[in-house]
Structure formats: C-alpha cells, structure tokens
Image (cartoon, grey):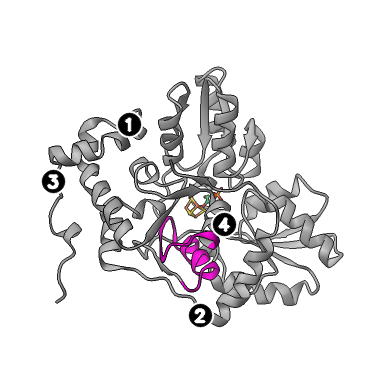
Amino acid sequence: MGEMPRSFEKELAYTPEIARETADLYKRVAHVMPEIEWAVHAPYIAAINKLKKEKNAVILAHNYMTPEIFHCVSDFRGDSLQLAREAAATDAKVIVQAGVHFMAETSKILSPDKTVLIPDTRAGCSLAASITGADVRLLKQKYPGLPVVTYVNTSADVKAESDVCCTSSNAVAVVEDIAREFGVDTVIMTPDEYLALNVAKQTKIKIIAWKGHCEVHERFTAQEIRDYREANPGVVVLAHPECPPEVVAEADFAGSTSAMIGYVGKHHPKRVVMVTECSMSDNVAAEHPEVEFIKPCNLCPHMKRITLPQLLHSLETMTYEVTVDPAIAERAKAAVERMLAVKMPVVAKAA
Ligand code: 13P
Ligand code: SF4
C-alpha cells in the first residue's frame, strides 16, 4: 500500500505560528466565521498555500465554494465563464479545480498541456448527468440545420457534439449570435430547460429545450419568494437563471453567480436574498458586512465535495488528474472557444 497522504493521516495542529501566518486571511472571512472554526481551517490553509507555490499550481474556485476555500486559498474565483477564461490564460503548470467535474474538464479542454486536478471525482452535476453525446446526435437528426447551444454544465462528449457553448452570463448573446450565423430563427438549447425558458423571454429567437434541471435551483418556488418578501420587508431578490421561470419572474434581478455578486457590490441593498446555492451568500456577506443576507439554504452536494482536506490531498498526491480524449477535446474546444469569442468582463483576481 502507498504512503498515506499527510492531510488524511491526522488533524493538522493550529499552532501560534499558524495563527500568526494566517491572521490576515482570517480578516477576509471573520464576518461569517467564528474563531473556533478558523482554528480548524487555518492549518490546512497554510499548508495548501505553501504547496501551491512548490508545485506551480493555481486553484480556480467557483462562487459556490465555502468561504475558507473561496477567500483563503483560491488564486482566481468567479462564475463558470470567468473560470473558463482563466483556465485558458493561466501560466501555471497545474490547475486545481475547486468546483465540479465539468469545470475541470473545460479547463483541460482549454489547457490540454497543463495538469488539471479535481480533488474529488464524485463532484458531478445533475445537469451534466441529464444528457449524453448520443442524445445530442439524435436531436440534430430530428432538427437538421438548427444549431445546438450547450450550457457548459455538460460533459466534453456533449460539448463535442454542439455548435457552441454558453454559460448563464452570456446565454442570450450566444443564442442570438449563433442564430445569425446559421441564418435561422430557432436554436436547440441543452440541457437546462429553465435556463432555456428564461433566455427565450429575452430574445426573439425560438428555442427548443432539453429537459434537464439543476437539482439545487429547481427546488425554489415562486411562493417561497413571496414568503421571503412578506417576512423581510424591502428585501431585494436576486435569482439564478437555472431557477424555474416563475421564480425568476418574482425576482428583482436574475443573472449568473458573478452577476448577482456584482449587483450587491453596485447597489448595496440593505437586505438581500440570493436565490441560489447557499455558500454564495456567505462569500458575498464576508465582503459586505453592511448588507443583511436572508439565507435560504439549498446546498449543491457536488460542490460541497470539495473541502480543504481534499484540496490539500489533491496537491500532495497530484490527484485526481482529469483527462479528455484528444479527438473529443478538439471538437469540444471549438464549441467553448466559439463561446469565449463573445466579449464579456474579465475574471476578478483574488487579492
Ligand atoms: P454560473 O456560471 O452562474 O456560476 O453557474 C454555474 C452553476 O453551476 C450554477 O449552478
Ligand atoms: Fe450542477 Fe446545480 Fe450543482 Fe451547479 S448547483 S453544479 S448546476 S447541480
């Protein structure tokens, strides 16, 4: 049997030296994390940050990571589109994806020469699991001549069969762009039915949707939103477009995870509810102590597979390496790069 990785052997100790070394990092999360909790995280944070340098690695963290990951060990953070852009641009030798598997695959597709690691291979996504490449081929047979727009929350196989990818922050622009290019008034959109319906409300292009759903966002209801408003007068409601359309209709603003963060930074609402995965509120609250966050807690079980011990283990053992068949990767890359050609804001670098 191989040697046990250090991080899984025993709990790491919170020494006075670690406390001093991580004191500035703690300030970033102090508003949402009691000191007693910091004592558990700090030794891992110190070890991860040291190992990252030794291995010439960067950690790309999605907005749904927990605050100790998001604010204290990530090099870049953002929504799916921002992380994809960063994966394409980084000079580091190793990318550790603090997010789910499709994000790591996208990084590998865009940076085939880099080592891409996912700390837990079980970090999947209900949307990615809802469709296969064979399903897309059948759709193309059924609707010949129509372009296929595929949400990045999919496997490389599905991306390879698609004409262009999109994320929640560029979906409308991508749909209109590809319809223009194909000279059609209808596109096929996979796999998120609700994102497709929400996009359809913002464009004249007709959309044929697949019936995949996000297991986190499909659980929100319009009644729940009305209840938040009644219980919290004046609350501003921000929703992710993976929510059902009747939920988005009740919101004051709908956008990608980063668009929601941007809304709080720009408007500083007194009270806000983010209708999305619950770590988002913690991450934004850490930076905006002046805003009161009402926190419905729908956790993404896949995102929550990524923890500090898993990240440290990943760096120590260089696991689990994400690979994509080069022939599939080449076709998937064309769809992702076509999406990246749509002009969008650049990624925010962690301070
Ligand atoms: P964003 O691109 O908005 O970050 O969404 C990714 C995701 O998985 C939301 O559930
Ligand atoms: Fe997939 Fe939903 Fe989790 Fe995002 S929140 S990774 S869409 S299951």
Q: Position of residue 107 (x, y in %)?
A: 50, 64
Q: Is residue 261 left or right of residue 24?
A: right
User: Residue under circle 1?
Assistant: 27
- How far is disc 3 from disc 2 in space, using C-alphas? 41 Å
User: Residue under circle 3?
Assistant: 13
- The residue positioned 45% from the left and 63% from the top of the image is 101
Q: Is residue 274 above or below residue 322?
A: above
Q: Any atom of ligand 2 within 8 Å of the CB at mark 3?
A: no
Q: Is tag 1's residue or tag 4's residue first in the polypeptide sequence?
A: 1
- How far is disc 2 from disc 1 in space, using C-alphas? 43 Å
- How far is disc 2 from disc 4 in space, using C-alphas? 21 Å
Frontmost of labels 3 and 2 is: 3
Question: Quick one: 180 or 88, which is closer to the camera?
Answer: 88
- For badge 2, the amino acid type reads Asp
Q: Is residue 150 above or below residue 296?
A: below
User: Residue under circle 4?
Assistant: 85
**Quadrant of the rendering where the N terminus is positioned:** bottom left
- The residue positioned 55% from the left and 71% from the top of the image is 156
- The magenta stretch is 88-113
User: Residue under circle 2?
Assistant: 325
Callout 4: SS: helix
